Image (cartoon, rainbow, N blue to C red):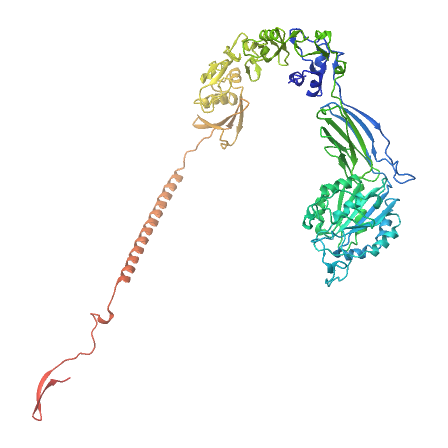
Amino acid sequence: AEGLNLCTSGSATSCEECLLIHPKCAWCSKEDFGSTKSITSRCDFLQNLVANGCAGAIESPSSSISVLQDVPLSSKGSGQTHLDVTQITPQKVALNLRPGDRTSFRVQVRQVEDYPVDLYYLMDLSLSMNDDLDNIRNLGTKLAEEMRKLTSNFRLGFGSFVDKNISPFSYTAPRYQNNPCIGYKLFPSCVPSFGFRHLLSLTDKVDRFNEEVQKQKVSRNRDAPEGGFDAILQAAVCKEKIGWRKEASHLLVFTTDDVPHIALDGKLGGLVQPHDGQCHLNEANEYSASSQLDYPSLALLGEKLAENNIHLIFAVTKSHYMLYKNFTTLIPGTTVEILHKDSKNIIELIVKAYNSIRSKVELTVWDSPEDIGLTFTATCQDGLSYPGLRKCGDLKIGDTVSFEVAVEARSCPAEDVSHSFTIKPAGFRDTLEVAVTYSCLCGCTGRAAPASAKCSGNGTYACGLCECDPGYLGARCECEEGASGDLHHALCREAEGKPLCSGRGECSCNQCLCYESEFGNIYGPFCECDDFSCARYKGVLCSGHGECHCGECKCHAGYIGDNCNCSTEMDSCVSSDGQMCSGRGACVCGKCQCTEPGAFGETCEKCPTCPGVCSTKRDCIECKLFNSGRLADNQTCQKHCKDEIITTVDVLETDDPNAILCAYPVNNCVMKFTYLELPSGKSNLTVLKEPACSSAPSAVTIVLAVIGSVVLIGIILLALWKLLVTIHDRREFDRFQSERSRARYEMASNPLYRKPISTHNVEFTFNKLNKSYNGTVD
């Protein structure tokens, strides 16, 4: 075995412990197995035990399988008797499992032709389904005609449901006892509410189905959800009253236009007792525990439907399709189809659902023990294998599919017991019974010899080892415990307080018997030494250049160091130009350690950023492309430039940030090239095909350039002057506007204004009628 040896590293002390470590581990029960100075592990891989001389005394049980019943698959279902129809093979298998040792067997399943069908039609008779009831009054005849195209043996039954007749699910006031539709103008008369009512047992007389449907009247409940899950459970578990046949395929068609009540909804009506999964139909075939038990859970429904091999078909209106679609993922073997609001498509729906059911096979497992792991691989009609898949679809009637079932026991049971489990296709009555026993005991254990002479008469000899009686110890129980025992133990310790035999061996009286290790040898008087605990370099013991002795590397010639990884040779550090590490580093332990920034390579010969690198690359370009330069000699060029990859181009690209641009003069021109150091250690040189030469400038070009420059400068100066003048004018105008707004004039007293009329006053004196007057004349 390569790598870690799980068997020897498990430290098994008995055959049974060895078998639990790994399914490939085996136990050697030979008496004189191994060396007297070391303990050879009796628990090892089978090939190792044989190589160590234990052939013929090896305990290595393996898992096995026995087919107890294997009746061939049937091809047709209907005939004189249906009890002998077989749709799964084999029917009984016995497994003997060793923990961890996987074994497998193949299961085949076939949907036989013309298989008998029992169909129970379960209808919601709440008020909203009144128009549906009218459309199914002749359903029995039409449905039988269609189903007889698929099977010659068809039976039909009928039941109905509304909801629990308790508040708040139904109308319970006295005035509604006989007619819960009182006061409802659209439909003033209906029958009292009920949970579930079984109306017609499964029969091949379809006329009775039509008669029973025509008798039915709708009822009315208070809330929107219905009590359909109560009805489904009773239809599934009341096998005798419903009339389910063992030899038939069971279909339960559930029609409704609303959502269902589920577990815990009953608490609203004071119902706290969970559903017990039992049949509760009274003599009148009505559900008698409707007002005592809560609604059933999805898990309980799934369990009871599977127990009775019933395919449930949800026929629901489009608005509730997604809800019931989600239910199908939680209830195995269930399908859902969209029902028109008036149920006109019910026959088409049932035929489609039946064909869908018959087109797929899915295996289910019942009562699987917790310590057993099962893995399925399906081989469907296309012949391909699908690991982890336990179902096949798109099948036709008569197609056969197979499943590889791998079984593995994870552990041994506490007691010597056997288990069993059942593999069953969903909705089938056929099953595969699997009985499991465990191979956890070694055969040599049953041949144990108490007080054996091989154990000095002081122990039981079993499977090559002695199990000493109390008070005795040693490989052969030859030593007594007590004072002498303590002395024997003291002789097996390297120093006081240290473990016996350094924890890597057993003390047999006064001598350490070292364990064997898959990593190497353990030795020494106290098992203190080994040849595998020395220093390593890159995972290699003593770097591969020395030997490990008791935890210390003894280096070969030419190597030094704790792990012998340092070579004393310096030839590998000399570069192609004869310098030590190309003059850019130091030789340490036979390898160059570059000290020049940017230098790398085995001899530090690569250095894109070092001064003078461009000249080194130039020499290679000249000698390889133009056969010139100081390396023009062909042999010298090939030696120094063996790692240079030179490519010529018309236009030199300089976008690569990792590429270094170099240039050198050639006959008044410039030769340009770039170089890039590759991870492989080589250099990629990209060179122009021709040197880049510049031409002399034209006189006319110079004159025009000068004139253009002068004109451009003049235009710029004029524009700048114009800008300054404009700014100055705008400032002056703004100042004028500001002063004008601050001026205040008295328009009535303009100093420049003169009136056009003048007034003069003349003083005079005159006598009139001997009277004197003083005055003025205007």
Query: Which of 505/537 is in front?
Result: 505
Residue furthest to the bottom: 769
- Indicate the position of residue 207 as horizontal and vertical percent values: 88, 52
Q: Is residue 524 visible?
A: no
- Indicate the position of residue 525 as horizontal and vertical percent values: 59, 6
The N terminus: image quadrant: top right
- Indicate the position of residue 7 as horizontal and vertical percent values: 67, 17
Query: Which of 742/13 is in front?
Result: 13
Query: Which of 409/361 is in front?
Result: 409
When asked about the image quadrant of residue 531, the answer is top right
28 left or right, relative to 558: right
265 left or right, relative to 400: left
Q: Is residue 580 above or below residue 613?
A: above
When asked about the image quadrant of residue 493, the answer is top right
- Indicate the position of residue 533 as horizontal and vertical percent values: 57, 13
Q: Is residue 728 above or below residue 454?
A: below
Q: Is residue 558 visible?
A: yes
Q: Is residue 180 above or below residue 463?
A: below
Number of numbered labels in the structure image:
0
87 left or right, relative to 745: right
Query: Which of 167/106 is in front?
Result: 167
759 left or right, relative to 685: left
The C terminus: image quadrant: bottom left
Q: Is residue 584 above or below residue 35?
A: below
